[in-house]
Image: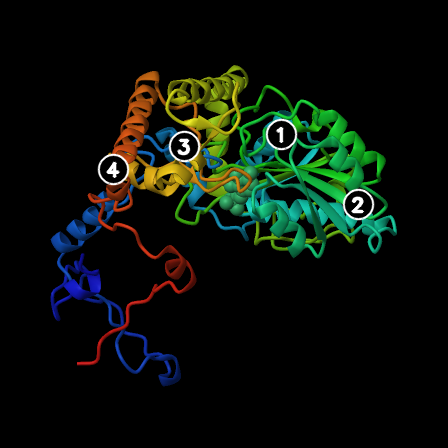
Amino acid sequence: MELIFEKSRPGRSHAYLPACDVPAYAFAKEYLREEAPALPEVSENDLARHYSALERRAFGVNNGFYPLGSCTMKYNPKVNEVTAALPGFTDVHPLQDADTVEGCLEVLDLTKKYLCEITGMDAMTLQPAAGAHGEFTGMMLIKRYHELRGEGEKRVKVIVPDSSHGTNPATGTMNGLQVVSIPSAADGSVDLDALRAAVGEDTAGLMLTNPNTLGIFDKNITEITKIIHEAGGLCYYDGANLNAVMGVVRPGDMGFDCIHLNLHKTFSTPHGGGGPGAGAVGCKEFLANYLPVDCSSAICEIPAESVGKVRSFQGNFLVVVRALTYLLSLGKEGVPASAKTAVLNANYLKALLADTYEMANPGLCMHEFVMTMEKEHKECGVSALDIAKGLLDEGMHAPTIYFPLIVHEALMAEPTETESPETIEAAAETFKKVYRAAMADPEAAHQWPVKAAISRPDEVTAARKPVLRWVKEEA
Ligand SMILES: *Cc1c(COP(=O)(O)O)cnc(C)c1O
């Protein structure tokens, strides 16, 4: 497909600007560029077709089933967009006086209040712009707690189960902590003996996701948080994906001190493509003074105990408006109902697939589950990647693959609560069809996808040496 720059023809345009009716202002020469920018010159028709063609090549949750595990690719209700577009929310400036934006401040306060209620926390910040950013902020609070007790130099280790999301060890390291990885027990839960052996005077805390990335709810959770607390550490809950438990059980009641939530996963705000997201961070009362300060006006004093600011102003405000819309439209009954439906849907898909795909963990799951192609890969070379690519040819988005790392040849699926039984049944048929086709002809499977715009790119080079800039060829 041609780039918009390549479609450009000198002089072709679709400007409707009237002639200037005020005297032109001349900038000093040092502020002016020497050459006009090489902007594409295309007609409106060409422009519209170009972007429509790009849109058709992309796949989003509005195109079809999107079972990307760990990511909660749920439908984003259109009413969220209606409220986020209200002029009272869009025509404001972060430097406006607080008394002129009271409605916006109420949105922030109400969202914090509801999220505290859902998580069992006492205080919340909406500043962080992503899940990883929230984790980083939350671990700063835990570090600050130890520092102010004079134990900062001693408590330098953060314990992370080997099933954790990759951002957890990264967050620990970025905060200057040493990451201690502990193995999972055979059923995917935390190995309590390994945990007891890992804690000590040097423990700053634990980072945990429950249900974990295998989709398993750890029944020993209160014992786990107790072990950490008795060693003098604090417990951090990675609540990026709260879809299985929101409104049902609360991380605060499980013994966690601090948490982040991805509003762009669980609370139905858009994600993918790099954001904008929102990684709300909540904590218990004793950590509240260390939270980043949400300055509501230009003049803002940051208390000495606070970790400071982690983002400009109030974070991604319009994302918060969408999340609050979601919470208000679901209501107190709708939030747990949504979580239970997410769990039901995941178990329905799991049950439909269990006679074809080997499950990493048998039995009931929470909002997601993991399949493994380890045996097929050993026996006839068909990999998780082949299955994922085959699904693309069937017009479906692939599940997450090769994660969690502790399952070999992993395919991880999360259908979410917004899919109907019919969609899940059709998706299961597609999964099975691709499996049968791959096993019947493994060589062909290695060539999939054959219908997609791009087949199998060199993903390492694409990630390490991305070509993101168009450079004009010299005439
Ligand atoms: C998605 C996710 C994250 C990271 O969130 P980002 O917004 O992508 O930074 C962290 N932990 C878990 C368990 C996740 O699923």
Q: Can residue 41 be seen in this view?
A: no
Q: Where is residue 367 in the image (x, y as percent from the top left)?
A: 50, 25
* Label ID, residue 80: 3
* Label ID, residue 322: none
Q: Are marks 1 and 3 in contact (CB under 8 Å)?
A: no
The residue furthest right is 150
Q: Quadrant of residue 469?
A: bottom left
Q: How far apart are marks 4 and 2 (CA)?
A: 52 Å
Q: Where is residue 210 in the image (x, y as percent from the top left)?
A: 61, 30
Name the mark nearer the viewer: 4 or 2.
4
Q: What residue type is labelled 1?
A: Ala
Please tell me which of labels 2 and 1 falls first in the chain.
1
The residue carrying mark 1 is: 186
Q: Where is residue 66 in the image (x, y as percent from the top left)?
A: 36, 33
Q: Distance between the residues labelled 4 and 1?
A: 33 Å
Q: What residue type is labelled 3?
A: Asn
Measured along the vertical axis of the image, is residue 422 above or below residue 178? above
